[in-house]
Amino acid sequence: MGLAQACFVGVLLFACGCTHSEVKQSGALDPGARSIAVRAHKNALSKAIAQTLASAGWRVVADRTGADKADGTRYRLLLTACAIDYCHGGRIYIYEIAIVDNRTGSRVLEQSGRECGHDIARKFGDVLRAQPRS
């Protein structure tokens, strides 16, 4: 499903008042290599996710290349989000976040759904803090 279709579905779900998120982990994050390339912030959600990573002890590096494999980092953050409405203190997004291993190209950790931006960042932080540390 493309982002435009997801936004349309999100608008329909908004009428139901449904919020949800789903986390999928398909591999272990290397606790000794907590470096991640993040593209420039496009909205409040992308800024909050980068701050969440930094707060969880990750070295966050600006991804200026947009290449599949960012230099000098073990992981790369992929984030797509479509703001569909307002919620208490922010925006409601339909979103998908993925941490991609630059060595293998695989998505190691994914979170997606439809929620308020601050709830997305909080849940993402909870998932990061639950990972083993070196």
Image (spheres, helix red, strand yellow):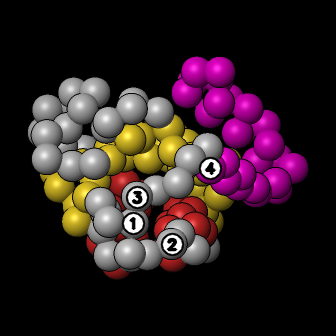
The circle drawn on residue 25 is: 4
**Residue stretch in magenta:** 1-25
Check contact, mark 2 vs mark 1: CB within 8 A: yes
Considering the numbered disc 1 on the image, is that residue within a helix, a strand or a loop? loop
What amino acid is found at the position of numbered circle 4 in the picture? Gln
- Percent x, y of residue 93: 57, 50
- Numbered badge on residue 132: 2
| Kind of residue indicated by mark 1 | Pro
Residue 70 in the image, given as x and y percentages of width and height: 20, 38
Q: Residue furthest right?
A: 16
In this rendered view, identify the residue nearer to me: 2 or 38: 38
Foreground residue, 57 or 21? Answer: 57
Query: Which x, y percent locates residue 59?
Result: 23, 65
Q: Look at the numbered discs 1 and 4 and tell me whether their residues touch, using CB distance below 8 Å.
A: no
Bin the neighbour count of mark 4 within 10 Å (Cα to Cα): few under 14, some 14-19, many 20 and up: some
Identify residue type, mark 2. Answer: Pro
The circle on residue 99 is: none
Q: Between tags 1 and 4, which lies in front?
A: 1
Residue 31 disc label: 1
Local packing at callout 2 (Cα closer than 10 Å; few below 14, some 14-19, many 20+) is: few
**Gap between marks 1 and 4 measured at Cα:** 15 Å
Tell me, yes or no, whether the highlighted magenta stretch contains residue 112.
Answer: no
Q: Residue at x 32, y 44 (%)?
A: 76
- The residue sitting at 32% across, 36% down in the picture is 103
Quarter-wise, where is residue 18 in the image? Answer: bottom right
Q: What secondary structure is found at the residue carrying circle 3? A: loop
Question: In the rendered structure, which amino acid carries the disc numbered 3?
Answer: Asp
